[in-house]
Amino acid sequence: MVEREAEPAMTRRTFLRRGAATAVVFGALRTTAAARSDEVDGEPGSAPQALSRRAFKVLAAVAAVLVGDLDAAAAARVARRIDAELTCHGDWLRRDVTDALLLIEYLAVVTRGRAFSRLAAEDRRTRLLAMSTSRFALSRAAFQGIKVLVCFFYYTCDETWPQIGYDGPWVARAKPASVA
């Protein structure tokens, strides 16, 4: 019996071709998303200030999954607060957050056949769980970054404190002196 040498799982040429194809696909998705961002409605009563409408819609959907079970109205406020905060920072941060949100949105197209913001609530939860444990660092990082933003802005909102048993800061807030 003649033993054959094991072929490499992927040649350098195959790796480069697949990498180039992936870059082209993500570039096309980003271009398409930018062109269609005005077509997608954002959260009712609030036009996004820093994010595109598409990215804002994804952010609101992620917030609804992460904190929506606790307070659905707070999830919508969280998305608006994050958007407002991004107006105070440089373009690089806004671009990074937008890129992470668009990765969440369009990675679901590849894995589920539909954009993240158009999935049912349970499918969104499953998709985010899959991203949190993905073998791809970029997918994990995108999820973790957006999760940190959502959780930070949710738990720093005064009206959420009673739900988690927090009475507020121990140091009394100084009342401004009244102007006579």
Image: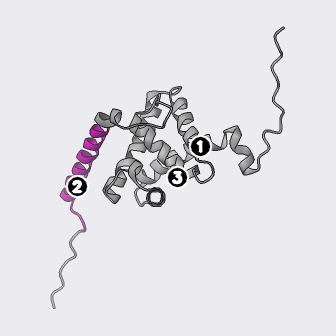
Q: Nearer the viewer, residue 147 or 16?
A: 147
In the picture of the structure, the residue carrying the numbered disc 3 is: 65
Q: Give the label, 1 or 2, closer to the camera.
A: 1
Which of the image's four quarters has the N terminus? Answer: bottom left
Q: Position of residue 100 (x, y in %)?
A: 42, 44
Tell me the crowding category of disc 1: few under 14, some 14 to 19, or many 20 or more residues within 10 angstroms, Cα based: few
Question: Which element type, helix, strand or loop, lies under badge 2?
Answer: helix
Instruction: Examine the residues drawn in magenta and state their main secondary structure.
Output: helix
Q: Secondary structure at mark 1?
A: helix
Secondary-structure class at tag 3? helix
**Percent from the top left, x then y, of residue 90?**
48, 27
Magenta span: 9-33
For the residue pair 113 and 139, the one nearer the viewer reads as 113
Name the amino acid, label 1: Ala
In the displayed structure image, the side of residue 36 where residue 75 appears, left or right: right
Disc 1: which residue: 73
Cα distance in 3D space between marks 1 and 3: 12 Å
Q: Give, as a three-letter code, the residue at label 2.
A: Arg
Residue at image coords 20%, 77% = 5
Q: Quadrant of residue 113?
A: bottom left
Is there a contact, CB below 8 Å, between mark 3 and mark 2?
no
N-term-proximal mark, 1 vs 3: 3
Residue 56: x and y in percent read: 45, 38
- Residue at label 2? 18
Q: Is residue 104 left or right of residue 109?
A: right
Are there few (<14), some (14-19), or many (20+) residues within 10 Å of tag 3? many
Image spot of residue 10 (x, y percent): 23, 64
The amino acid beneath tag 3 is Val
